[in-house]
Amino acid sequence: MYVATKGGERAIDAAHQWLAEERRGDPSVPDLSIPQIREQMKLAVDRVMAEGSLYDPDLAALAIKQARGDLIEAIFLLRAYRTTLPRFGASAPVDTDRMDITRRISATFKDAPGGQILGPTFDYTHRLLNFTLMANGDVPSAQRKESAPIEAPHILSLLDRDGLMEPLPASDETPRDLTREPLEMPADRPLRLQALTRGDEGFVLSMAYSTQRGYGRTHPFVGELRIGTCAVEMEIPELGFAVDIGEIELTECETVNQFTGSKTQPPQFTRGYGLVMGQTERKAISMSLVDRALRWEELGEDDTGAPAQDAEFVLYHCDNIQATGFLEHIKLPHYVDFQSELELIRKIRRDAETAMQEAAE
Amino acid sequence: MTDQAYNFAYLDEATKRMIRRALLKGLAIPGYQVPFASREMPMPYGWGTGGVQVTAACLTPEDTLKVIDQGADDTTNAVSIRKFFERTAEVATSENTSEATIIQTRHRIPEVPLCEGQILVYQVPIPEPLRFLEPRESETRKMHALSEYGLMHVKLYEDIARHGAIATAYAYPVKVEGHYVMDPSPIPKFDNPKLSDNAAIQLFGAGREQRIYALPPYTQVVSLDFEDHPFEPSKADHACDLCGAETSYLDEVITDDQGSRMFVCSDTNYCTTRQDAGHMGRLNQGEPA
């Protein structure tokens, strides 16, 4: 006779044990250390920090190890940890003008004050597998040159001075916080940027790519892309001034986009903006394209019905933790709903068959 | 990190207060979807994060918690959520519906009528009953504000024109106190009548969609229908093969590759209680279950 399956609890425990063993893999191979992941899987660590919205390379490396290299799972671990952290306050806005630059390029000017710095980029590497990495290779070392600190003002600010760039209204208003308030529509630009910067790299990339292929085209040029570290300062009320509490690595991208004009404004260039934690260049460029596409309304452009112009579509679907959870939940039991569907389809078929028989007679 | 590092029932008190405010607003405006700042939980979105946050905000150390999924206490996700609260809140748990003060559920309402003082917490995947008719949140909120539900009636009418019946078997839309159309979560429509005039507080949490809504005790809840096509709660036309119950919602279980089936109560606590009281079904003639 049938006895309803019990033992969900034992099954869960056993599955967790199995998972732990699989995560470690062959025990004759040395265990990965957190510093190894942090130092040698840096771009994975950066992505996990950016989409996990928590700047902590060690915890991100731990999350990657625990998640067996599944980056979305690692991002989830970091997010779930972050949500429990107490909030002491907010930092002062980070000044990217004063960034300690490791990479800075402009596609719009051959040279600019501060110069172009390629930095550690894959850009001009030939994508050939380097089999020497399979052996225990030597420690590579790059050539070095002394340099004075680089003064590098934002390149678009130079265009700004000529009035060719759309002016950005400055505001000291505290932006709404996506992680502390529900995302409600219409979302203003600060909220949109918050959602995009923690959005899934693949999703934001594809959205940006779609604008390049004509779905909400914005004619972007990379005005400036910069990567480097910025000091984070916080006002301490007891002290009455801001103190450095650390530094974070950031990637910032500003695009220059096609000019618009109106009856009151002469034509000028418009902009898209991307700012992402870590060395996350693909994401920052993608973000600036999507940001620009989402600005169609305030810039008086037409809604062409492109997905990247649709704020609800982009913002409600860019979060990979929400997406993966809801997608994967369909593997949970649904027998009750399915049973009700079964009964309904049987009833409808019965009615339809009777009707067909009657029609035949 | 030890479990002591987390607050009672996992969430910090400020977050619980934020959720309680949303719950109170929801109770004050039955059926209205209140936006709330849903937190990332240590289980994935879609696994009941909304329900878990609502339960966490309602739990007190004196509570007795029951968790069911598909009507059963022992499905894996129900086990997992129950363990989560055993670990983070150390509350008493029970499988007995009438013993529990808070019941978190996915996809069912227990068979035994609830009573005053009990709270039923639903896990909700898509809180918006109009979502599949109008994908835009900015539009659906307007439609609710204006009670502009023509689109829903057209959908139900088209079902009848095409299939001869309303082709919704679960998450069947209801109207609350004559105003808001509400999604009752994916419960089978068999359970819909239990939503109305229920003595318990019914709370609905949608974590990913960041919405909370509620039905205070004894709220009038009407399943949408037409005069000539009245709403019909339905279940499999059988009795439970284990306890013989004829009025409970049944799961169909395939027992071999010859098309044999059996039908058993989806509410496992209801079924075992009946069996313990000596009720027997077709396939349960005196042997211990």
Image: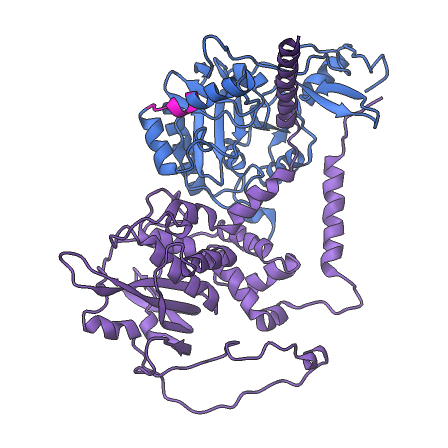
Would you say residue B148 sits in the magenta stretch?
Answer: yes
Q: Colour of chain A?
A: purple
Q: How many marks?
A: 0
- Residue at (64, 58) in percent of width and height: A66
Q: Is residue A111 left or right of residue A345?
A: left
Is A137 placed above or below A169 here? below
- Residue at (72, 80) in percent of width and height: A135
- Residue at (56, 19) in percent of width and height: B163
Within the image, what quadrant is residue A277 found in?
bottom left
Is residue A322 among what the camera can see? yes
Q: Is residue A347 left or right of residue B225?
A: right
Within the image, what quadrant is residue B282 found in?
top right
Q: Colour of chain B?
A: blue
Is B122 placed above or below A273 here? above
The residue segment tinted magenta is B147-153
* Image position, residue A207 (x, y; %): 45, 55
Is B69 placed above or below B40 here? above
> Depth check: B86 or A284 in front?
A284
* Image position, residue B227 (x, y; %): 45, 8
Which residue ends up furthest to the left in the rendered image? Answer: A264
Which residue ends up furthest to the front in the rendered image? Answer: A361
Type of colouring: by chain
